[in-house]
């Protein structure tokens, strides 16, 4: 009878140790994956900026009557909001937007989803792909 509690305790120890070991491994993985995630984001940013501006403008035109708002790219990362139905002096709004600020969170999202220890890489890549798809539509 005394052996059963010992066996149960022996079975619980690896689980408890694995749980204690999980957080340091996760933090280490996040720190290691932040640089590659940032590099991939920086590489794809010019294409995603164009996609984001064009798709946002198209989505806005679905609900806008008359469809007069335009997003005008200024450099690689900035955009100005323009209205075609206003006189030229007033057609550009005074403030623009920094497009990269709208999707910089994808760096952390990718690093966090890929950093989970104990999950096979194929599953991690599937999870990050779903998360990125949802973020793009959001």
Image: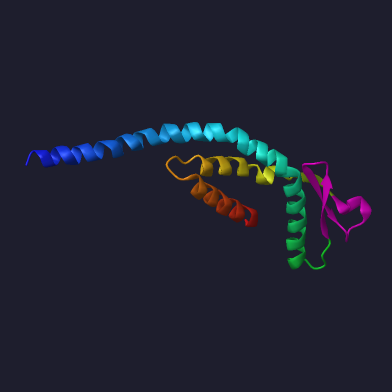
Determine the image quadrant of residue 99.
Answer: top right
Q: Residue at x 65, y 42 (%)?
A: 104
Q: Quadrant of the N terminus?
A: top left
- State the residue in front, 14 or 16: 14
Q: Residue at x 66, y 46 (%)?
A: 103
Please state the horizontal and vertical placement of residue 125, each as a whole percent of the image.
54, 48
Determine the image quadrant of residue 42.
Answer: top right
- State the residue in front, 11 or 96: 11
Q: Which residues are magenta?
A: 69-92
Would residue 90 appear left or right of 15 to someone viewing this image?
A: right
Q: Quadrant of the C terminus?
A: bottom right
Q: Where 28 sits versus 44, above or below? A: above
- State the residue in front, 46 or 105: 46
Would residue 61 appear left or right of 114 to someone viewing this image?
A: right
Its colouring scheme is rainbow
Q: Residue at x 66, y 36 (%)?
A: 39
Would residue 3 appear left or right of 54 to someone viewing this image?
A: left
Please state the horizontal and vertical placement of residue 86, each as a whole percent of the image.
89, 58
Does the stretch in magenta take in 24? no
- State the residue in front, 93 or 137: 137
């Amino acid at each position: 009878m005394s052996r059963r509690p010992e066996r149960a305790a022996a079975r619980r120890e690896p689980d408890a140790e694995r749980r204690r070991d999980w957080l340091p491994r996760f933090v280490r993985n996040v720190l290691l994956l932040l640089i590659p995630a940032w590099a991939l984001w920086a590489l794809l940013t010019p294409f995603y900026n164009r996609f984001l501006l064009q798709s946002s403008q198209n989505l806005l035109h679905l609900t806008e009557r008359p469809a007069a708002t335009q997003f005008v790219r200024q450099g690689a990362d900035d955009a100005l909001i323009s209205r075609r139905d206003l006189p030229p002096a007033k057609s550009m709004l005074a403030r623009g937007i920094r497009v990269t600020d709208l999707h910089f969170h994808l760096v952390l999202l990718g690093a966090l989803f890929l950093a989970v220890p104990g999950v096979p890489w194929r599953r991690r890549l599937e999870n990050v792909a779903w998360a990125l798809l949802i973020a793009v539509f959001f």
